[in-house]
């Protein structure tokens, strides 16, 4: 995972396309590839079938890919690249979207909220709560893109109200 404080300069688009289309692992952590047709983002080395170049976009960080509405690939696990097991468990919980992990819920799992916050800020450039909010937004955007109603998108993505959704959207 690329450190959030690292430079945000990406290689040229032709170089990133070449690296992604050839599954070049040397570029893992340098950039992440979003696939517009699936709403998924991957590591350059992802073994999944490669999309057409016109259907991909590139991001310097996990944060930017997540806030653009992409979800992590289930084959290459770009957000988990090198993450400890406790982080992988939290990322999976955020992806499932079934549980809201408050500070007390983190403590119940034996995790200190300050440690979780520091790790996510350092590695992803956002807190765990911001990551969860971004994934809920991503699920809502995906539902809207697929033709679902705003009500269904908002409530099925885990927002408690339209105002909560608007507030998260504004912050993003």
Image (tube, rainbow, N blue to C red):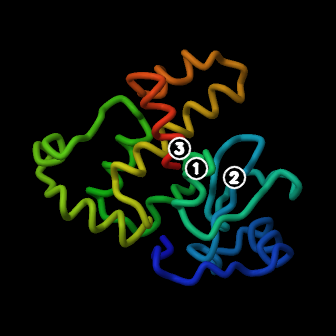
Percent position (x, y) of residue 18? 82, 73
* Residue found at x 49% / y 48%: 171
Relative to 124, does residue 132 appear above or below in the rendering? Answer: above
Q: Which residue is mark 3?
A: 170
* Residue 45 quadrant: bottom right
Q: Which mark is residue 73?
A: 1
First in sequence, mark 3 or 1: give its number: 1
Q: Nearer the viewer, mark 3 or mark 1?
A: 3
Relative to 145, does residue 134 appear above or below in the rendering? Answer: below
Q: Are marks 1 and 2 in contact (CB under 8 Å)?
A: yes
| Residue situated in front as seen by the camera: 73 or 105 | 105
Percent position (x, y) of residue 78? 53, 60
Q: Which mark is residue 151?
A: none
* Residue 46 quadrant: bottom right
Q: Which mark is residue 48?
A: 2
Relative to 97, does residue 131 appear above or below in the rendering? Answer: below
């Amino acid at each position: 995972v690329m450190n959030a404080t690292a430079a945000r300069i990406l290689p040229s688009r032709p170089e990133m396309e070449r690296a992604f289309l050839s599954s070049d692992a040397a570029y893992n952590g340098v950039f992440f590839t979003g696939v517009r047709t699936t709403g998924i983002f991957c590591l350059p080395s992802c073994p999944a079938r490669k999309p057409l170049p016109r259907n991909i976009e590139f991001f310097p960080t996990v944060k930017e890919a997540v806030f653009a509405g992409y979800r992590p690939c289930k084959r290459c696990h770009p957000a988990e690249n090198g993450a400890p097991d406790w982080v992988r468990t939290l990322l999976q919980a955020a992806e499932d979207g079934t549980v809201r992990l408050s500070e007390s819920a983190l403590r119940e799992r034996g995790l200190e909220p300050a440690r979780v916050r520091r790790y996510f800020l350092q590695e992803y450039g956002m807190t765990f709560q911001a990551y969860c909010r971004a994934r809920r937004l991503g699920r809502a955007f995906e539902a809207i893109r697929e033709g679902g109603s705003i009500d269904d998108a908002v409530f099925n993505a885990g927002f408690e109200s339209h105002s909560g959704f608007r507030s998260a959207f504004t912050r993003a």
